[in-house]
Amino acid sequence: MARAHGCNVASAPTIEGLVKLLEEWGVDGPQTRHTIEQYHQAVSLGDSDISLDAPSGYGGQSPRTIIGGEAPFFIMEVQPS
Protein backbone atom coordinates (compact mmCIF):
# COMPACT_ATOMS: atom_id res chain seq x y z
CA MET A 1 0.00 0.00 0.00
CA ALA A 2 2.81 2.44 0.84
CA ARG A 3 4.43 1.80 -2.53
CA ALA A 4 1.12 2.56 -4.26
CA HIS A 5 1.25 6.02 -2.64
CA GLY A 6 4.76 6.71 -3.95
CA CYS A 7 6.76 5.72 -0.85
CA ASN A 8 10.17 4.12 -1.18
CA VAL A 9 9.90 0.54 0.10
CA ALA A 10 12.63 -2.10 -0.25
CA SER A 11 14.18 -5.20 1.28
CA ALA A 12 17.65 -6.71 1.32
CA PRO A 13 19.19 -9.97 2.50
CA THR A 14 21.81 -8.18 4.64
CA ILE A 15 22.19 -5.06 6.78
CA GLU A 16 24.89 -3.85 4.39
CA GLY A 17 22.41 -4.31 1.55
CA LEU A 18 19.93 -2.09 3.40
CA VAL A 19 22.57 0.56 3.89
CA LYS A 20 23.36 0.55 0.15
CA LEU A 21 19.67 0.94 -0.70
CA LEU A 22 19.35 3.83 1.73
CA GLU A 23 22.42 5.48 0.19
CA GLU A 24 20.67 5.27 -3.21
CA TRP A 25 17.78 7.19 -1.62
CA GLY A 26 20.22 9.90 -0.47
CA VAL A 27 20.59 8.74 3.15
CA ASP A 28 24.02 9.04 4.81
CA GLY A 29 25.43 5.47 4.81
CA PRO A 30 28.04 5.86 7.57
CA GLN A 31 25.46 7.53 9.84
CA THR A 32 23.01 4.71 9.12
CA ARG A 33 25.60 2.11 10.15
CA HIS A 34 26.33 4.12 13.32
CA THR A 35 22.62 4.34 14.18
CA ILE A 36 22.15 0.58 13.70
CA GLU A 37 25.18 -0.13 15.90
CA GLN A 38 23.92 2.24 18.62
CA TYR A 39 20.49 0.62 18.55
CA HIS A 40 22.14 -2.81 18.83
CA GLN A 41 24.19 -1.70 21.84
CA ALA A 42 21.21 -0.13 23.57
CA VAL A 43 18.80 -3.00 22.94
CA SER A 44 20.78 -6.23 22.99
CA LEU A 45 23.65 -5.25 25.26
CA GLY A 46 21.57 -3.08 27.61
CA ASP A 47 23.99 -0.16 27.25
CA SER A 48 22.20 2.62 29.15
CA ASP A 49 24.85 5.15 28.07
CA ILE A 50 23.36 5.07 24.56
CA SER A 51 20.58 7.57 23.97
CA LEU A 52 18.18 6.66 21.19
CA ASP A 53 16.21 9.29 19.25
CA ALA A 54 13.03 7.22 19.46
CA PRO A 55 11.48 5.26 22.31
CA SER A 56 12.01 1.51 22.23
CA GLY A 57 10.13 -1.23 24.02
CA TYR A 58 7.58 0.79 25.94
CA GLY A 59 4.29 -0.96 26.65
CA GLY A 60 4.77 -3.91 24.33
CA GLN A 61 7.20 -6.59 23.36
CA SER A 62 10.83 -5.89 24.10
CA PRO A 63 12.67 -4.53 21.07
CA ARG A 64 15.01 -6.84 19.20
CA THR A 65 18.22 -5.98 17.44
CA ILE A 66 18.52 -6.53 13.72
CA ILE A 67 22.24 -7.33 13.85
CA GLY A 68 22.38 -11.10 13.59
CA GLY A 69 18.64 -11.20 12.90
CA GLU A 70 16.83 -13.11 10.21
CA ALA A 71 16.74 -11.77 6.68
CA PRO A 72 15.21 -10.30 4.68
CA PHE A 73 15.37 -6.85 6.22
CA PHE A 74 12.83 -4.23 5.18
CA ILE A 75 12.93 -0.44 4.97
CA MET A 76 10.30 2.16 4.20
CA GLU A 77 10.86 5.85 3.76
CA VAL A 78 8.50 7.98 5.84
CA GLN A 79 8.07 11.74 5.86
CA PRO A 80 6.01 14.01 8.08
CA SER A 81 2.85 15.33 6.50
Image (spheres, grey):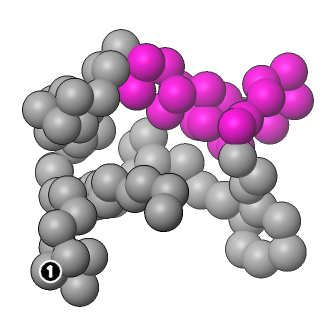
**Residue 77 image offset from top left, x and y in percent:** 32, 54
Please tell me which residue lies in front, 51 or 14.
51
The three-letter amino acid code for the residue at tag 1 is Ala
> Can you say which quadrant of the picture contains the N terminus?
bottom left
Instruction: Please state the total of marks drawn on the protein image.
Output: 1
- Name above or below for residue 45 compared with residue 68: above
Residue 3 on image: x %, y %:
17, 73
Q: Is residue 30 above or below residue 62?
A: above
The residue drawn where x is 29% and y is 29% is 27
Question: Is residue 16 among what the camera can see?
Answer: no
Q: Residue at x 43, y 18 (%)?
A: 31
Asked if residue 59 lies left or right of residue 34, the reply is right
Q: Classify residue 72 as left or right of residue 38.
A: left
62 within the magenta span: no
Tell which residue pokes out farthest to the bottom in this image: 1
Q: Would residue 25 be seen by someone viewing this image from the given angle?
A: yes
Q: Which residue is mark 1?
A: 4
In the rendered structure, which segment of residues is drawn in magenta?
Answer: 31-53
